[in-house]
Image (cartoon, helix red, strand yellow):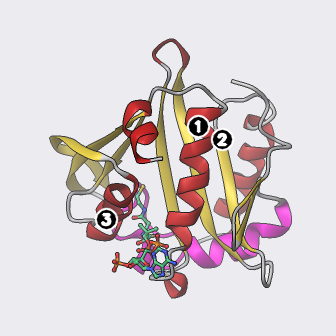
Amino acid sequence: MPAFNNLQLTTERLHLRPLRMSDAPALFGIFSDARIMTYWSTPPWTTMETATNLVERDLKALPAGEYLSFGIVRSADQQLLGTCSLFRFVEQCRRAEIGYGLAYDTWGNGYMHEALTALVDYGFAALNLNRIEADIDPRNTASARSLERLGFQREGFLRERWFVDGVVSDSALYGLLLSDWSVRK
Ligand SMILES: CC(C)(COP(=O)(O)OP(=O)(O)OC[C@H]1O[C@@H](n2cnc3c(N)ncnc32)[C@H](O)[C@@H]1OP(=O)(O)O)[C@@H](O)C(=O)NCCC(=O)NCCS
């Protein structure tokens, strides 16, 4: 995949851009909140180092095109609202996985729908993907609604796929095809 470190997308209310080290405190504030980490693949963050490590990882991986990850910034006040990403690219099969998380006090405003619409569109139009998939906890109804609002279909159910902090959970698998997206557009 191409280098993503200079990539930015703009929507009506948002600016999607790579994370910077100066985002670490805001990032920590978002992902240390247990309310958004209930169905995440890790426990809530407990140290700022987790945030700085993630930004450091992005600063290396984005220029190499290993994955695409954006900080979601509200244009009106420059507040970091969350992140969204495309990762696990399989270029031969033109597919990738999608992930996203939004600060709890900003839920219910359509921000993630706006961000994911731009991200998915970029994935299909610019990266030539044919399929985007998501692996979510079947109990994560807010996330399922986000996916279904974009046209993702629930395609599978995998039992006891995750252990987080010793607690096991299942996966619901969702998929969105280029042909689904083209019809919706
Ligand atoms: C998944 C998650 C991002 C969804 O957040 P969200 O606020 O529901 O999503 P959006 O920002 O797209 O907002 C959509 C909601 O805002 C409402 N809304 C208000 N104004 C809107 C607008 N202008 N456009 C679209 N929706 C709008 C919608 O009706 C919808 O509410 P509903 O689902 O109750 O009908 C959030 O719950 C989250 O961060 N969860 C924790 C992290 C996680 O589990 N991530 C997924 C694992 S990969």
Q: Earlier in the sequence, mark 3 or mark 2?
A: 2
Percent coordinates x, y for residue 9 in the rendering: 74, 53
State if disc 1 and disc 3 touch (CB < 8 Å): no
Q: Secondary structure at mark 3?
A: helix
Q: Quadrant of residue 82?
A: bottom right
How far is the residue under mark 2 from the one under mark 1? 10 Å
State if disc 1 and disc 2 touch (CB < 8 Å): yes
Q: Earlier in the sequence, mark 2 or mark 1?
A: 2
Percent coordinates x, y for residue 119 in the rendering: 60, 49
**Residues drawn in magenta:** 21-45
Q: Secondary structure at mark 1?
A: helix
Q: Is residue 43 left or right of residue 167?
A: right
Along the line of sight, which residue is nearer the eye, 52 or 107? 107
Mark on residue 145? 3
Percent coordinates x, y for residue 114 in the rendering: 56, 65
Question: What amino acid is found at the position of numbered circle 1 in the picture?
Answer: Gly
* Residue 53 is a magenta residue: no
Residue drawn where x is 45% and y is 82% of the image: 108
Q: Visible in this render: residue 67?
A: yes
Q: Which residue is the site of mark 2?
A: 68
Q: Quadrant of ligand 1?
A: bottom left
Residue drawn where x is 77% and y is 49% of the image: 56
The answer to whether mark 3 is within 8 Å of ligand 1 is yes
Residue farthest top in this picture: 92
Q: Which residue is the site of mark 1?
A: 123
How far is the residue under mark 3 from the one under mark 2? 23 Å
Question: What amino acid is found at the position of numbered circle 3 in the picture?
Answer: Arg
Question: What amino acid is found at the position of numbered circle 2 in the picture?
Answer: Leu
